[in-house]
Amino acid sequence: MTRRLYRRAHLPIPADAAQCTRPVVYGQSVANLSIVLASASDRLMQREEMTMTRYGFVASGGGYRSFYSAGVLVWLKKNDVPVVHLTSTSSGNNIVVDYLLWDWQSEELPPVLTRTLRLDVTDIFHIFSNFLGLRPQLLPTGTHLFTVDRDSCRKSLLLDEPRRRELLAEHLKTLRWDIRATNLSQRRGHFFRVNEILSRIDDASLGTFMSAFLAGITTLPYFKAITIDGDYYIEGGYLDNTPLRTLFEDDEVDEIIAVDFTDYDYHRELDKLYHSKSFILPFNSIDTHLLVSDMQLTLPNSRIFAQATLINEMLKAMGKASAEIGGKRYYAKPLHVLRPKDLESMTISLKDSSAQKRYFELGQQEAAAMFKPS
């Protein structure tokens, strides 16, 4: 695999974000460059003098769509793009923890992702039955469909394996990870700082981490709300499905890459439901509920991105690189938004078992296109 070195230049970004240029990529067509005449020591000195762009990456919630985010994140790692801060919520949490448990040097892909992309029917049912340790209620109450067996969940995430714990500790030394959740009791968003929670990795700290992790993925009414210090927590997508704030606050992050799943034809899907046959009422009811849930968790993204653009524009108008607002210091940062079109949100799909691979590959392709040299 060709390794590339990215200097502090900027990616092309959408029209609604701050303008910047494409990344400068070194190591291609070397024979055509005069640098080939330089000595090895001169080339080494040039590389050391270069300042590398440091990226923050947002693993948005999106259910099944998060395989796309996994594709982007894997491409960034394989191409040596420095990612120094990760934020996530909902299914994005699964993508990030799998990424951090991945042996970057000796494994081709993150471990759970590897199993998922095999696309074997047995694997699909295995993932469905063990995914996050889901267990249906023995005595249904109507308040939620599943409870989570924490031990099974921790095991399915591979957090019981000593080597994976070592990898997690090593990787958390190189970057920050924040999980976005919603404190329902206090009616406000909350960031769990994973680096602080797992400053030392042992059974006790992993127990605290599991509470934060599960809080960040708990969607009502599928799961029962998580209780932490007497408050109810649910996933962050209800208030912020693309958690950007701590990336704007982090002066170690130069630019931000985010994934937005709102480019979905809700009109078409709603029209299908309205024109469907009455004798398939149970299926229509389920599909309508899923569509409404998806809209509730995804459509608020437009407000989040509008706020991010406003921060950049305000700082630009003020002629400042940063400013303190509401007790928080925000830094001007180019924001690069990937918007895949019409990806389905279902986490487990038995009718289309190839979708996870297609979404993953699409994420890799679009990440590569974003970094394509001019």
Image: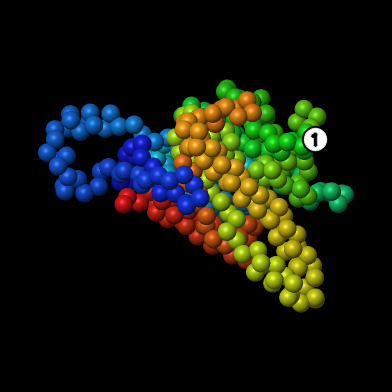
**Picture layout, residue 270 above or below residue 63:** below
Specify the color scheme. rainbow
Regarding residue 114, the answer to whether it shows in the image is no
Residue at the outermost top position:
200
Regarding residue 286, the answer to whether it shows in the image is yes
Dot 1 lies on which element? loop
Q: Residue at x 57, y 33 (%)?
A: 246
Left or right relative to 273: residue 79: left
Residue at the outermost left position:
37
Q: Quadrant of residue 261?
A: bottom right
> Which one is nearer the viewer's eye here, 85 or 265?
265
Residue 269, image x, y percentages: 67, 67
Residue at which label 1 appears: 185
Q: Residue at x 44, y 49 (%)?
A: 13
Residue 27, image x, y percentages: 25, 43
Q: Residue at x 76, y 77 (%)?
A: 277
> Which one is nearer the viewer's eye here, 225 or 82?
82
Residue 242, image x, y percentages: 60, 44
Q: Quadrant of residue 78?
A: top left
Q: Residues within 10 Å of mark 1 (few under 14, many from 20)?
A: few
Three-letter code for the amino acid on which mark 1 is drawn: Ser
> Which one is nearer the viewer's eye here, 93 or 268?
268
Left or right relative to 32: residue 138: right
Q: Quadrant of residue 156?
A: top right
Residue 329, image x, y percentages: 56, 27
